[in-house]
Amino acid sequence: MKNRNHFTRRNFLALLPASAFCLANVSHSAMLQAENTSEMNNTSQLNAFCPGELWYDNNNVPINAHGGGMLYHEGRYYWFGEHKIEGDAGNYAQVGVHCYSSTDLYHWQDEGIALKVSENPKSDIAKGCILERPKVIYCAKTKKFVMWFHLEVGQNYSSARSGVAVADSVTGPYRFIESKRINAGFWPQNAPGQFKEPLHPEETEYLKKLSLHGGPVLGYPRDMIFRRDFFGGQMARDMTLFVDDDGKAYHIYSSEENGVLHVAQLSDDYLSHNGSWVRIFPGRFHEAPAIFKKDGKYYLFSSGCTGWAPNAARVSVADSIMGEWKELGNPCRGSEEDKNLTFRSQSTYVIPVIGKENTFIFMADRWNPKNAIDGRYVWLPIQFDADGTPYLEWKDSWSY
Ligand code: DGJ
């Protein structure tokens, strides 16, 4: 029987002027009440991105792939992201990594859960863990799909591990291999000689007195934490992956209590790290790295460290992925709020649009930690200055 109070997307569309591309800010739960799917079919056939608005898959269900990444493979885009549930519980991994596919980036087909959390409480990826920012790359050498993600074993952010899973088919199922800290026993390539030694006792004492909470801290020691973690491996939280034109793959992550970004090369099969890594921007506290390459230069979007709350984005450039990296400032243009809060979002990935030269999409999350499933996606076109510097401007709706 039909619920008289139900609110369908079609009802809502009828209220909008014909020129409006995107749904206004309807709450997720209101939309979930829309139960008559036949009424909702064929209402999402818009060839436009509507940043911050609800975005539906082929089943008319809101896309659930937060902190996501994109893989283009054999003519289709695959969007992998954190499947979240309602409420605060959704900030923990209750389901796994969701996958969607598309040929045009506007219309998405649900491909199901690519990596499931484990029902075994002893597993590193036990249901209720923190599993964030999954990214998938294809290894041409092994013909396997490799997923890396930020993993916290348990419900706080102290383990700062990286998880890796592998699949024969792009949509999965992905088989969890292991989680670990990174590059134990390897010094960074760009550390001066005097720092290539473990901490001295007085440095250990100094560190113990600091309250390191993942954000900027007075007296943050720029050159101690990677030495503290030399034997056990480096911390890794927010992360992304990048495969360069020569097939070499890199893992870029916030490390050293979030105070330093690391760029670490993966092994040839992409399943581990090969010991070659650099530290960039020590003491600058970058999160949410999202990288792309244009005209031989590498560009990196990132954010500051303010938990789920948005802050001002940053963009950086390098001629080589292993550096030197240089910060170029805040890429956002618009109102003070747009600039200070990155359009109320935080970067997660940059999508190169295949077949469209110099066309890149800034992919970001507008988190909603009180009702995690209702986090929104903010996708904006990356624009370029006359000197090639990338910048971002708000668009209510746009197409590439
Ligand atoms: C910001 C990060 O970018 C997110 O992925 C998540 O880890 C939150 N912090 C948690 O506060």
Image: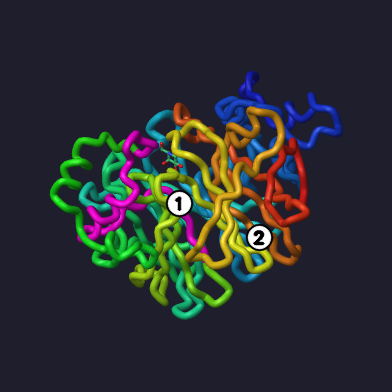
Q: Position of residue 170 (x, y in %)?
A: 51, 65
The mark lying in front, picked from 1 and 2, is: 1
Q: Quadrant of ligand 1?
A: top left
Nearest the viewer among 145 and 31 is 145
Give, as a three-letter code, the residue at label 2.
Pro
Question: Residue under circle 1?
Answer: 281
Query: What's the residue at 45%, 27% (across, down)?
Result: 370
First in sequence: mark 1 or mark 2?
Answer: 1
Image height of 30 relative to 38, above or below: above
Please, what secondary structure does the residue beneath circle 1 have?
loop
Where residue 394 appears, x then y in whole percent? 71, 37
Instruction: State yes or no: Cβ of the residue under disc 2 lies below 8 Å from any atom of ligand 1.
Output: no
Q: Which image quarter: residue 365?
A: top right
- Which disc, if any, is residue 352? 2
CA gap, disc 1 and disc 2? 25 Å
The one nearer the camera, 232 or 381, is: 232
Residue 149 location, quadrant: bottom left
In depth, the one of 218 and 396 nearer the eye is 218
170 left or right of 52? left
User: What range of the chain is rendered magenta?
Assistant: 214-242
Look at label 1 and name its amino acid: Phe
Direction from residue 132 to residue 311 in the image, left or right = right
